[in-house]
Amino acid sequence: MAKLTLITGGAKSGKSEVAEDLYGKEHGVCYIATSVVRKNQDSEMTLKIKKHRQRRPADWTTEERYKDVSIFVLMTNYHKYLLDDATMMATNLFFDLVAKMFNDFPGNVDEDIEKMDQDQIESIQSTILQEFAKIADSLKRTDQEMMIVTNEVGLGLVPASKESRILRDTYGLVNQLLARQADEVYFVVSGLAQKIK
């Protein structure tokens, strides 16, 4: 029977470790890494990705992707998936969509974002939400399980920049959608998980 679990928490709260521990004794898990290694990537992100890879059991499969996750789930037959994380997936989709909207590849997305009006922002947010809704819908059509890790972004200050505010709002909308669709939701604080749904 299909099952969706959401693991949310602040930055460095231990949410990824909690998710990995919940699946720790499972074999053949597919780890969907949404932080895809890119050319000219900063060394901090490269090191973070390396540490995540080292923590995973050797018999887990890693799939690096943030696009067409719903199709991937339907086309593969892993019993369990761990998507880490929804925030990075939403970020990658957001910047792709901004570049596409302004026909600006690779372009200067910072300038493009400053030009965006509310209708354009909502259009991009709607497209991102559709991608996550498709994942939940695809899962329901299988007997597979998925755990999704995400950043809880609603506990901090209002960001100073327009880009950060748009992203913060987008993450919040994604988290709400996933929490509604999820069978179980855990909130992680200082490495401790509290089941809230």
Image (cartoon, grey):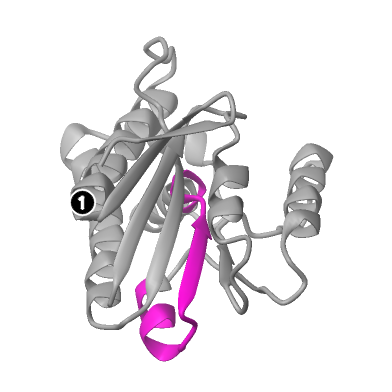
**Is any atom of residue 99 visible in this view?**
no
For residue 179, side relative to residue 152 (left or right): left
In-front residue for pair 35/109? 35
Q: Residue at the far front: name it.
A: 25
Q: Residue sitting at 60 percent across and 35 percent down?
A: 14
Q: Position of residue 81 (x, y in %)?
A: 49, 69
Examine the structure image and report whether residue 104 is included in the region drawn in magenta: no
Tell me the residue at 33%/44% (across/down): 185
Corner quadrant of residue 11: top right
Q: Residue at x 23, y 82 (%)?
A: 141
Q: Is residue 122 above or below residue 78?
A: above
- Residue at 49% across / 60% down in the picture? 83
Point out residue 56 in the picture as x, y percentages from the top left corner.
72, 61
The residue carrying mark 1 is 126
Residue 78 lies in the magenta-colored region? yes
Q: Which residues are magenta?
A: 70-89
In terms of image quadrants, where is residue 132? bottom left
| Residue 175 visible to the viewer | yes
Where residue 123 appears, x then y in whole percent?
Answer: 20, 49
Q: Nearer the viewer, residue 163 or 152?
A: 152
Q: How many marks?
A: 1
Badge 1, how many Cα within 10 Å: few under 14, some, many 20+?
some
- Relative vertical location of residue 163 with respect to residue 33 in this rendering, above or below: above
Q: Position of residue 99 (x, y in %)?
A: 44, 53
Residue type, numbered disc 1:
Ser
Between 166 and 190, the one lying in front of the other is: 190
Query: What element does badge 1 sit on?
Result: helix
User: Quadrant where the N terminus lies?
Assistant: bottom left
Q: Is residue 144 left or right of residue 64?
A: left
